[in-house]
Image: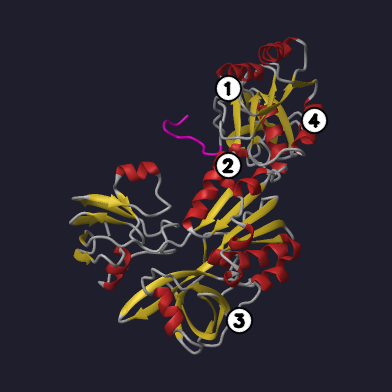
Amino acid sequence: MERGYSIKTKPIYGTLVWQENATHHFLVVAGEGGKALLKLFQQMVPKQATTIFYLAEDDASKKYADTVQKMTGETITICDSLESLLDSVKTALENCYMGTQFYVAGEEGLIWPVAKTLSEFGVDDRNVFKEQTGSLARRVFCVHCETINENVHHDIHQCGTCGLNLIVRDHFSRHWGAYMGFMVDGETPGEIPAAQEVYP
Amino acid sequence: MSALKVKVTAVEEVAEHIKHFSLAALDGKPLPYFSGGSHVVVSMDINGRTHRNAYSLMGPTSDNSQYQIAVRKQEKSRGGSVFMHENVTPGTELEISMPTNLFAIHRLAKKHILVAGGIGITPFLSQITDLNRIGHDYELHYAYRSAEHAAFREQIEALCGDKAFFYPENETGRLNITELLSKQPLGSHVYVCGPDPMVNGLELIAKQLGWPSTAVHSEKFLAPASGEPFTVSLLQSNTEVVIPGDLSMLEAMEEAGVDAPFLCRGGACGRCEVEVVECDGELVHHDDYLSDAERVAANKILPCVSRANCSRMVINL
């Protein structure tokens, strides 16, 4: 990689910190993102109301939710699939007003579908606090078959839908919530560089 | 700056101290179309001096045969609004800039909340025609001192129907901004134009209520502040200009024949920003554009509204 060069569209994730100028805090976390949630409540239990959604696909990843619940008495809605989580989030958003601050912690596979749902409600992605936890794997959009590949660790990645070998560009699309993947051997069919695990 | 030559076709007093001017192109051709929230800068020749004031275009945005502006006669006028009220009559020829928009509606918003104080109603009149056309949800909240100050109320009622709310201060008291901003749906954007305390107050309340700054839009047309005279040395033009106490840096430079860049002339857009190479005193910023960090660095100034307490300043122009 060239020194001093960076891609402006590439998201830079932060650490969740309470935004005290808010009337309501709305948090969505998954798996290891629970640790970010716990750290947030260790900073402070906020004065304002909180709404917390937790995606726990197995019992083990629920541990942080239990700790937060015990520590604070806050109600945490636990969902067992991304689909049901997004449905619950949508229902809850119907009753939210301006002044609600949004926080998301988890892998990119959680962060960007949640950001997309929020944007449908007019919440600008710039105003959603995000912390990336767990795997650094990327979401990749195959520009050929227009599908999203989740949890992509490698660059060259074979598209799970159309089977093309994709080079994953660092350009990130807010619209798709994913990096762009292009056929790597379009010019010279069959010449496919070795895949490297760059996002463990 | 490209300019449009226009002729005043009608003048009407629409409220106490507020006159409405209709302008048509001198050559009879259509004027450029503009978007809701746009303004033009009107040049006036006042006793041999060119004076420039920005006024919002009131629309409708579908009409390019004429531009509509409204001018409130300012008590502490530097001459511009008094000139418009006393010297400009049907038939007067004026020069105006091309329309510029620093106060456009945000197209991705789910709902638009427009808040006007007094003459600050003018940019909303054109925004409303845009909002009506694209069918977005909006509310207009219009505050004014008393019934005789309620310029364009009938026109607004006709345009907005039940989306308009009126607050004559002497009858209903002040518009409660906290209440207004407390229960707005997600995706709302608020727009405010009015006197400084109203704009600053709304911005502060919105911030305290957790509104992101990206959803809060404001427009103020600042008159340049007066102050002590000082000398500006222009590095590239290799000339010196004395800035009198009652003219802005920009006005004084223009008078001296310097072709300085400008757009809004109200400290909002940043177009006139210039590098301060040297200053033997303190910069006095009046703009809404420079960041706090830039103010601390003290190496930039917006000559349209800001000046300095100094004897000499060197700028890179």
Estimate the spatial distance between the alpha carbons at disc 2 and disc 4, rounded to whole Å: 24 Å
Label 3 is placed on what type of residue?
A: Ser
Is A30 positioned to the left or the right of B200 in the image?
Answer: right
Please state which of the two labelled residues, at mark 1 or mark 3, is closer to the viewer.
Answer: 3
Question: Which residue, given by chain and number where applicable, does mark 3 sit on?
Answer: B65
Report if the CB atoms under discs 2 and 4 are less than 8 Å apart: no
Q: In this view, does A8 lie above or below A30?
A: below
Estimate the spatial distance between the alpha carbons at disc 3 and disc 2, rounded to whole Å: 39 Å
SS label for mark 1: loop
Is B280 positioned to the left or the right of B122 in the image?
Answer: left
Q: Are marks 1 and 3 on the same chain?
A: no
SS assignment for the magenta stretch, majority: loop
Question: Which residue, given by chain and number where applicable, does mark 1 sit on?
Answer: A198
Chain to which the residue tagged by mark 4 belongs: A
Q: Residues within 10 Å of mark 4 (few under 14, many from 20)?
A: some
Q: Which of B112 and B278 is in front in this view?
A: B112
Q: In which quarter of the image is residue B186?
A: top right
Magenta stretch in the rendered image: A1-9
Please, which residue is most extreme toward the front here?
Answer: B171
Estimate the spatial distance between the alpha carbons at disc 1 and disc 4, rounded to whole Å: 34 Å
Estimate the spatial distance between the alpha carbons at disc 4 and disc 3, rounded to whole Å: 52 Å
Label 2 is placed on what type of residue?
A: Pro
